[in-house]
Image (spheres, helix red, strand yellow):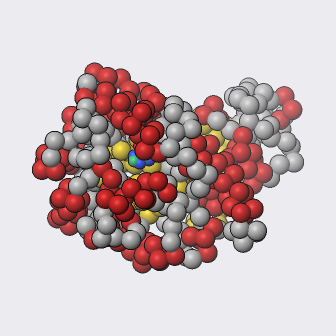
Amino acid sequence: MAKRLAFYGTIIHSQNIGRTDILENALICTGEDGIITALEPNVPPDQLDDKLSGLNLNTEVYDVHRLHRGELLIPGFVDTHNHAPQWAQRGLGRGLQIIDWLNEITFKNEAKFANLQYARKVYTQAVKGFLKQGITTASYYASIHGPATKLLAEICFAEGQRALIGKCNMNRNSPPFYIEPSSQESLTATQEVIDAIKQIDPEACLIKPILTPRFAISCTEELLQGLGELAAENPGLPIQTHFNEALSEIDMTLSLFPDYTNEADLYSRFGLLNDRTILAHCCHMTQYEIERLKQVGCGIAHCPIANTTVGGGFMAAPIRDFLRQGITKIGLGTDSGGGFSSSILDAMRQAFIVSNAREKMTAGKDQSLTVDECFYMATLGGARVCGLDHKVGNFAVGKEFDACLVRTYEPADHDMDADLDLSVPLGVMTPIEVEDSFRTILEKFVMSADDRNIARVWVRGKCVK
Ligand code: XAN
């Protein structure tokens, strides 16, 4: 059981892609189960004590936080595409095309997760590292190894991170030291991991299994068929894969599956394209595929850092085009280690950069993204992609309290609201000025903060940083 929490101050969250609510003088409370029990904006400061006693909020059972002007409460970040074993290879292999990068850097690194001692060390660092940066939910690709994948699930659960966790399926086009011997063995190991995760967290309070065919290149038809059957037998089971990431990858996929002209039809034929599917990248999309994704309701994991630093291209998903066509089930992925950064703040910034490039490339047709849109993708959009928006992504009575306390100044013993000039900025974030609106403070945070400004983090009401 977590301690009950109450916060009074400024809360910022998304309601949808175009709407960010800034709630000033807001009071939010949680129960011992981490569920939000009250959310009320515009509580005048002189009425706060009455309100707290009216809600029966005494500090013995509640941890009461009064936020000053330099602090904000925002939803925890959702990382919709993350390779946990690549924590130790982030940033390596720049300049390589995607298939070469996999062969020269990634598969050698992931093969090390056959060793459970090594897996424990790296996965513990990774999960703690992501939580430290406010990533309260992650959709993880593990390695091909069942035991190490179970270990990742145990670590997420113990550290208190919400996660979807998938053992990668790979039974072809992979090096001899990093390949599953047959489709049957891959399927059996997948089922074992699903069962183990359900045993660790039977009510799926924090962690859930996810089917993870790495991409069609690494799976035989028989394996994709078997995974599609698993998906059909388990109606709540999500699926994740890489999709239309790079031209070389698409060419190779279609040459391996000559009966198909596009990846959407391929995954659909094997029962792997549905409203529980998370498609990472979606960079090179035909109009037909955009319409199929919309029709089916797939989630899109936009990974702008990896798309511009690995894979030999400067082509990230056409987000403005998706939005124009009514697709809003879009989140951000760090895609670390293809993405060199494990920060969703960095992913937001790179999403702006690639959208600016697209604006130029399309002569102004695809306008660049806004702060509201990126903030949505980092929070509520990501929760939608992971099928968790009924629980997290923003704040509402009945949802679970996953949150970050943003702090822009060092804690001080003077009245920070009155004496901003005496305050010492925390980290290297753009400093707050007296005249700044909370919208400006949010923009400064998104564009220039780092993990030092994420002072505390809660998942399901439990403090994890
Ligand atoms: N395709 C991939 N793309 C990527 O960015 N990272 C990977 O690990 C991977 N595997 C297949």
Query: To which quarter of the image does residue 421 belong?
Result: top right
Using residue 431 as the reference point, say whether residue 361 is left or right of it: left
Q: Which residue is pictured at 62% across the width and 52% down the height?
A: 314
Residue 29, image x, y percentages: 51, 51
- Of 185 and 192, the residue lying toward us: 185
Residue 169, image x, y percentages: 26, 48
Compared to residue 263, the image places residue 52 above or below, namely: above
Q: Which residue is pictured at 31% across the width and 27% down the height?
A: 112
Q: Which residue is pictured at 25% across the width and 29% down the height?
A: 114
Residue 442, image x, y percentages: 71, 49
Query: To which quarter of the image does residue 15 belong?
Result: bottom right
Tell me how many marks there are: 0
Using residue 16 as the reference point, say whether residue 398 is left or right of it: left
Q: Quadrant of the N terminus?
A: top left
Residue 101, image x, y percentages: 45, 38
On the question of residue 276 being in view, the answer is no
- Of 159 and 216, the residue lying toward us: 216
- Of 353 and 129, the residue lying toward us: 353
On the question of residue 93 being in view, the answer is yes
- Of 40 and 15, the residue lying toward us: 15
Compared to residue 198, the image places residue 145 above or below, namely: above
Q: Which residue is pictured at 41% across the width and 40% down the height?
A: 102
Compared to residue 169, the image places residue 102 above or below, namely: above
